[in-house]
Image (tube, helix red, strand yellow):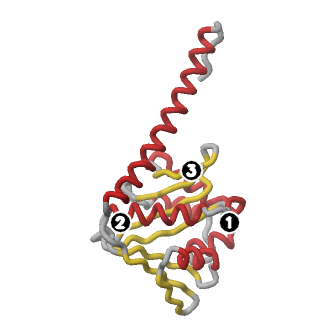
Amino acid sequence: MLIRRLPPHERSSYADHLKRLCSDDRHLRFARAGVSDEWLDSYVATIPEDGLILVGMQRNQVIAAAHVAFDSDNGVAEVGLSVDAEHRSGGLGSELLNQAVVFARNRRAERLYTLCLSDNRSMVALARRAGMDIQFSQGEAEAHLPLPPPDPLTVSQEMSAGLFAVFRDWAELFDRYGSLASELASGGRAKR
């Protein structure tokens, strides 16, 4: 399992992940009913180029994601999480939330915020485990976590996560070129 930042040119894989959520899960994730595939495409398309999407990848497929959006002065970072149904209860949501905290701190956000429906027990439990202060009102739960400034540990955590992703990509690239070179050396034709 690899957790990494999703670059803008791979945003369609985030949309594909969201589209795999059933209607109840879409309702819980976005705190609204009737979330269609078209709405999800529009939502993903409106995320700014520098928007932060952290993903959990398995076999080159996004199976979990955390979208972190910053307010205009970067004082507050809002996070929304989603995990494919078959990958829940394994700690992936917690890991994504922890990484979101690190990324938000490193961008000098003063507070992490999430809003969910109060009957979204998974998200409420996740926010509680992360130490977020949760307020319930009119069927919604708002969770806040004050964030200290970045420190050398958070910077190194983000760097190591990014470097791990780069090394993984390089390893895959070398594997592909190694296979291609072996094929060519044995007289076979290169596959494209």
> Is 113 placed left or right of 23 in the picture?
left
At 51% from the left and 62% from the top, the residue drawn is: 66
Outermost residue on the top side: it is 187
How packed is label 1: few (under 14 Cα within 10 Å), some, or many (20 or more)?
few
Residue type at the position of mark 2:
Arg
Nearer the N terminus, badge 3 or badge 2?
3
How packed is label 3: few (under 14 Cα within 10 Å), some, or many (20 or more)?
some
At 50% from the left and 85% from the top, the residue drawn is: 134
Residue at mark 3 = 13
Q: CA distance from mark 3 to mark 2?
A: 26 Å
Q: Picture coordinates of residue 183 (x, y %)? A: 63, 14
Residue type at the position of mark 1:
Ser
Residue at mark 1 = 89
Q: CA distance from mark 1 to mark 3?
A: 22 Å
In this rendering, the label closer to the viewer, 3 or 2: 2
* Count of marks overlaid on the render: 3
Residue at mark 2 = 105
Nearer the N terminus, badge 1 or badge 2?
1
- Which quadrant would the C terminus be assigned to in this image? top right
Q: Quadrant of residue 116?
A: bottom right
